[in-house]
Every structure is written in C-alpha cells, then in structure tokens.
Amino acid sequence: MNREQSTRQWYSRYYTQSGADRNDLRTNRGVLFQTIAMEASFVRAIGRVDHDAGAAKVLDVGCGGGGDIYQLTRVGYHPCNITGVDILEEHLDRARSLYPQVEFVHRDASSMDFADGSFDLCFSSGMFATLPDDTLSAGIASEMVRVCKPGGWLLIVDWWTPKPRDPNYKALTKRRLRELFKVGSDTRVVGIYRGALIPPVGRFLSARLPALYFLTAAVFPFMVGQVAYLLRKSE
C-alpha cells in the first residue's frame, strides 16, 4: 500500500469511528472552544514573526482541504503568495474551490520539488501527530527545513500529549520536535504557545461548560494537549 492509499484509509477510519461531524464547527458544539484555543496559539506564535506578511512566501504542508488557509490570510499573508501541498487530490480539489488564488500542489511532502530556500514561512497543522512513521516524519521535516529560507520561519501546530493504545498516533513532543527539525543545528526554537485542551476534556467543556474552558487551561496546564511550535532556520 502506498502512502496516498494509507492516508486515505486513515481519514476514512477516523471519521467512521468519530463521526462525520467530528470537526464540524457549525454543528458540533464540542469543537468551538477547541478551535478558538488552537487559533489563539497560532496567533500568539505568528505575532513573533518579524517579516512582511504581505510579501512573504508561505508553504502550507499537509494543507488538506484548505482548512487553515484562512488563518494565514487573516493575519496578512496574501493568497497569491501561499502554496499548499497535500498527498490527496480530492482534498486539493476542495481547497482549490475555496481559494482559487492559492497554488495547490499534489505531492508527497517528504519529496518536494521546490528549490532550496523558496519560502519565508513553512507551516503545518495537525500533521506530525498522525504520522507515527519516524522515517516519513523525518523526511517531511527535513524538506520543510530545506525549502525554508535561511533565517526563515517554521510554524508547527500539533498535539504534544500521548494517546495510549493508538498505533496511528504519535505525539509531537518537544523531544521529537528537536529530533525531526534538528533543533540546535539547523533550527532553533523561538517559542512554544499552548492552545487546546486534550480532546476528551476540551470537547466536553466546549459543549457543556464553556465558561470553564480557559479557566481549566490556566489552572491545569497539564491538560493542554495542543501547542504551536515556532522555529527559526539557521542563517
């Protein structure tokens, strides 16, 4: 089975088990505050980036159906300067219908054909935790670093807490981040920004007790399962 087929199976299995509305912001009340918290971590991280967003070239790795493109555009990145890469053509068809100005490329992100240093910002969201294969993860991370300009930025929004007994999940811990992105030699960590609570807690509070969501995150920081890692490539 090739990677495209295995990725397609992963999505089919995930939504079959969790329900088609698992991440539907419009119909699933458990999603709202999880989304707000995750986006807050993104905004805090991107606020540290010191380039001109209007002129910067951005790569969204594992862009899927374009679900995170709006986050980039609303903080000033121009759609014409954004490129999205995904391994599933059906995801890209949806993304193209939503964002016709963005360039979308059907490609395995562990072997991209962009030139070295093509992008000012390389971004991914929720991808590495769903890639338990260390060789594949290392290949994608290496490519992200390669195509990032010297002194450029990498923003990885993902889950850093474990999910026991799930072979299709591997948390992007600080240790794993350091290994994948060669922190200390090829990159350095600029900041780590906490976001959404671990899903069982966060989804429950979002749906039933939303007033306690951010209080819980503040009082019990160990329950925060998602973070935004901001890295800078070495000059």
Image (spheres, helix red, strand yellow):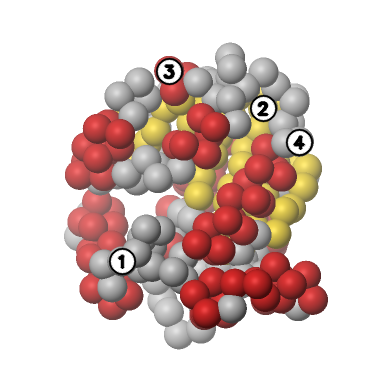
**Which residue is disc 2 drawn over?**
152
* Residue for point 67% across, 18% down: 52
Res 21 label: 1
Res. 220 in view: yes
Question: Which callout, 4 or 3, points at the residue further toward the start of the chain?
Answer: 4
Farthest residue to the top: give it: 55
* Residue for point 67% across, 37% down: 46
**Which residue is disc 3 drawn over?**
80
**Which residue is disc 4 drawn over?**
48
**Residue 152 in picture, x, y percent from top left:** 67, 27
Considering the image in quadrants, where does the C terminus appear? Answer: top right
Question: Which callout, 2 or 1, points at the residue further toward the start of the chain?
Answer: 1
Three-letter code, disc 3 = Cys
Q: Residues within 10 Å of mark 3 (few under 14, many from 20)?
A: some
Question: Which callout, 4 or 1, points at the residue further toward the start of the chain?
Answer: 1
Question: Which callout, 3 or 1, points at the residue further toward the start of the chain?
Answer: 1
Three-letter code, disc 2 = Gly
Depicted 29 relative to depicted 87: above or below: below
Residue toward you, 101 or 177: 101
Label 2 vs label 4, nearer the camera: 4
Q: Quadrant of residue 86?
A: top left
Q: CA distance from mark 3 to mark 2?
A: 19 Å
Q: CA distance from mark 2 to mark 4?
A: 12 Å
Three-letter code, disc 1 = Asp
